[in-house]
Amino acid sequence: MQNRICENIDKIKAEIEHTCAKCSRNPENIKLLAVSKYFPAEDIITLYNHGHRFFAENKAQELRDKIKVTPEDIEWHFIGSIQTNKIKYLIPNVSLIHSVSREKEIAEISKKAVYENIIQDFLIEVNISGEESKSGLNPDKVKKFADYCNNLKNIRLKGFMTMAPFDSDEKELHKIFGSLRNMRDEFNSYDKNITELSMGMSGDFKIALEEGATILRIGSSIFGTRNY
Ligand SMILES: *Cc1c(COP(=O)(O)O)cnc(C)c1O
């Protein structure tokens, strides 16, 4: 079991390097998050002992419980839907919150960051495809939301996150990920803090890399199929 997870992440890393070489990108500029949701802390420790330090969870309580039993120097990311009453489990534990799309969420994050006396980095989740079932802000609402965030204390917008619909073909994936990159570039032209593009999962990370992803969120290709 342990070997399989380590072999899987080595394989993904090799694929990232290969894809980066093809599109003239430096793989050192890509952060690979191992999405450990639904998998036990032992699997996280296995990867930790293999040298991996970047992990992501999508449930606040599961994250809190895993932080208690895993090494302190893991860099945690939160990629799930945000419940304001559970923000206390995220701050100050996570280095980046990927999934912000509502005023009341970011207001609460700001409040807790002020209380903890830290600056909390976050991404705005964008629903590029406009698919109803997907979470995230519609692209035309992002500017107004970013302006709202700008007036809050102790938070820093670092970029954008998106999830593509599972049934997208390659052409659609290029379009979705390319649109998010264009949005990042536009924001970056007046705010140099805005650099990150969290896009690409097990099934679509190569196309996301070609379109400029800086953070990949990969679960099942590393840990195996999840039992929900
Ligand atoms: C579960 C999850 C992932 C990882 O998905 P895989 O297909 O298992 O790689 C990425 N992003 C988010 C937001 C997720 O919830």
Image (cartoon, rainbow, N blue to C red):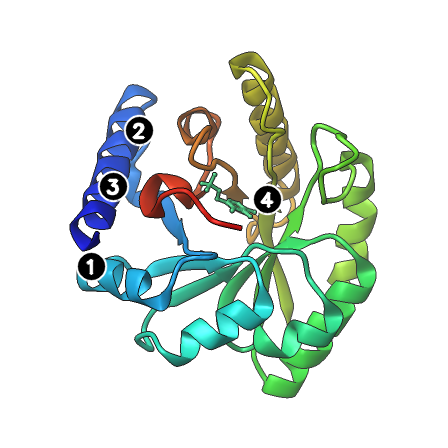
In what element is the residue under mark 4? strand
Query: Badges 1 and 4: C-beta atoms under 8 Å apart?
Result: no
Q: CA distance from mark 2 to mark 3?
A: 18 Å
Dot 4 or dot 3, earlier in sequence: 3
List the residue tagged with mark 3: 8
Dot 2 or dot 3, earlier in sequence: 3
Dot 4 or dot 2, earlier in sequence: 2
Badge 4 crowding class, 10 Å Cα cut-off, few under 14, some 14 to 19, many 20 or more, is: many
Dot 1 or dot 4, earlier in sequence: 1
The residue that appears at 32% across and 73% down in the rendered structure is 73
Q: Residue furthest top?
A: 171
List the residue tagged with mark 4: 161
- Give coordinates of residue 26: x percent, y percent: 29, 36
- Give coordinates of residue 170: x percent, y percent: 52, 15
> From the Cβ of disc 1, is ligand 1 less than 8 Å away?
no
From the viewer's perspective, tell me whether residue 97 is left or right of residue 127: left
Amino acid of disc 4 = Met
List the residue tagged with mark 1: 51
> From the Cβ of disc 4, is ligand 1 less than 8 Å away?
yes
Badge 1 crowding class, 10 Å Cα cut-off, few under 14, some 14 to 19, many 20 or more, is: few
**Badge number at residue 20:** 2
Amino acid of disc 2 = Cys
Residue 22 can be seen, yes or no = yes
Q: CA distance from mark 4 to mark 3?
A: 24 Å
Q: Nearer the viewer, mark 2 or mark 3?
A: 3
